[in-house]
Amino acid sequence: MRAARNVLEYLVANEVQHIFGIPAGSVNAFFDELYDMPELTPIVAKHEGAASYMAAAYAKYTNQLSVCIGCSGPGATNLVTGAANAMREHLPVLFITGAVPMNTVGLNASQELDVEPVFRSVTKYSVTVNDVKDVLKEVALAIEIAISGVPGPVHVAIPIDIQHENIESVEMPPLPKRLPIVPDLGTIKETARELVKRDKGYIFAGQGIRNSVESLIELAELLNWPIITTPQAKGYIPEEHPLLVGVFGFAGHEAASALINEGDGKALLIVGSSLGETATNNYNGNLIKDRFSVQMDFDQSVFNRKYKVDIPVLGDINLSLVLLIEELKALGLQKESVALTAEKKKEEENAEEYNTKNVLLTLQKCLPSTTRYTIDIGEFMAYVIHHMKVIDFDSYNINVHFGAMGSGIGSAIGSKLAEPGRPVVCITGDGCFFMHGMEILTAKEYNLPILFVVMNNARLGMVYHGHSLQFRRTHPSFEQESIHISAMAAAMNIPSYRITELEDINQDVINGLMNSNGPAVLEIALVDNNTPPMGDRVKFLSSFGK
């Protein structure tokens, strides 16, 4: 049996169902074996970078290992950005790349590149297999590393000749299992004692709460403390929950900023946030100022980076929350009636104006309540975070941390494959579309009903506004000729529609696009010169430059 087949069978044993990537000479042994393995479906993308975003989203929404494959040299380097994104998002993706035959290493072979060190800084583990007897051992080790501790991407490069070598007697390595990090009970008890001493405090929730939302809400209701989320945690706490104040950080809400900057809360319980730049409004010093601070996370490296917390709690977040709730109850804390923490801000002014905010809110009214939105990088992202509603759980995928343009397009495909029954809408911009927009063909080829909403302002909007704030002028190169994107989609036989005014968005149009057997494109032709609601980011940018 060829080594390539051994690897694929081991992946199947690990419940892998899809492999994302692009076939090429240095990995074709794998694709040849896939012909006889119907249980493993290759998702062939148009660009390896997009395939890496698909794989990351698939890992996120299946809570399982995902696999992405690319050729040696350029295929591998095209995967690096996606690996960095997966690393930032703590997503277990196995990146497999080809490599030139062992006897041609160093001879300037076609597509030769030693990518092991290239991947090392953007993965938890990167290795090149130099002996066929080590193939399964290295793949198994990589998978174990990917799913253990803090999940993340790993990389294995396998030379062409090793892929084709036969392995006589195959002994499958044990299947790795993820074990939760158990928090120290003494630390949990200390945390409970300190929290009950303080009658007022806030819960600061990051994207790490994704699998712990019920426990987090139970804790908030027990303490009767307001919940503030980071931008990437938008979509986890229901909009109507009386304790939800809103988003703090990039494109956040005034009510959340007011609590952090002026509120009288004596404690801050940070749950599942690494307290990065976008989450903290450019490292706002008021976050823990004069407050007792507790940070709960499964990643030890996030503690005491910028903010020195009083108690770091290392462990599985859901388990930590459950144990903390038990300790608080043991100390006599009882749930009381939950008071409304802050009146939700009403959408005001000019609901009929053709602008980004009104387009997004009108669009959301026409879409199913269960829709998941994969949000790309651009000025529209700020409007999504600030204005769009949280109607159903886990409804937003926003990669604002790493900020890779075009990632939302691939993420939509990975999300749809992970949860076929859930409506998926990608909100992207023309700049992102021109990077990875051809993946709408991938969605077509696999009959994936995804609505791609393209905000077309014929410029790099986030760059335009950011540069304008920082330097009080913009370069003409930030803008370009307007392209009829819906016509591009039509040329690919993909249903499309072009919006030029707010009245064009209606239920019939949206239903027609959403009920397609495959993808559809909704182009929003709109130049919005309003400054996006970027919060303190505006002040930050304005403080530099001219």
Image (cartoon, grey):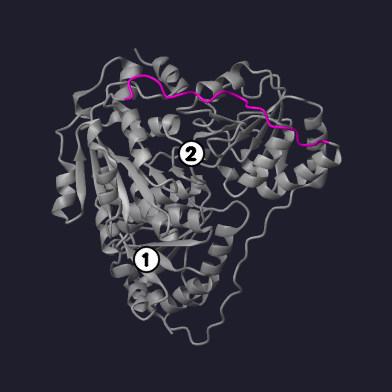
> Compared with residue 499, is residue 66 higher up or lower down, i.e. above or below?
below
Residues in magenta?
A: 333-351
User: What element does badge 1 sit on?
Assistant: strand
The stretch drawn in magenta includes residue 342: yes
Q: Position of residue 54 (x, y in %)?
A: 39, 55
* Depth check, front residue: 109 or 370: 370
Q: Is residue 316 visible?
A: no
Q: Mark 2 or mark 1, which has the lower sequence index?
A: 1
Residue located beneath label 1 in the image? 98
Viewport quadrant of the C terminus = top left
Q: Is residue 189 left or right of residue 402?
A: right
Local crowd at mark 1 within 10 Å, few (<14), some, or many (≥20)? Answer: many
Q: Is residue 236 left or right of residue 526?
A: right
Inspect the image, locate mark 1, and give the three-letter code of the amino acid beneath it. Answer: Gly
Local crowd at mark 2 within 10 Å, few (<14), some, or many (≥20)? Answer: some
Which of label 2 and label 1 is nearer to you?
2
* Depth check, front residue: 323 or 295: 323
In the figure, residue 541 lies in which quadrant?
top left
Inspect the image, locate mark 2, and give the three-letter code of the amino acid beneath it. Answer: Val
The stretch drawn in magenta includes residue 404: no
Which secondary structure is most common in the magenta stretch? loop
Viewport quadrant of the N terminus = bottom left
Q: Position of residue 225 (x, y in %)?
A: 68, 30
Name which residue lies at 70% across and 26% down.
201
Residue located beneath label 2 in the image? 390
Asked if labels 1 and 2 touch by Cβ distance under 8 angstroms, the answer is: no
> Compared with residue 487, is residue 16 higher up or lower down, i.e. above or below?
below
User: What element does badge 2 sit on?
Assistant: loop
Q: CA distance from mark 2 to mark 1?
A: 42 Å
Q: In the displayed image of the protein, which residue is found farthest to the top?
A: 546
Name which residue lies at 29% across and 49% down.
511
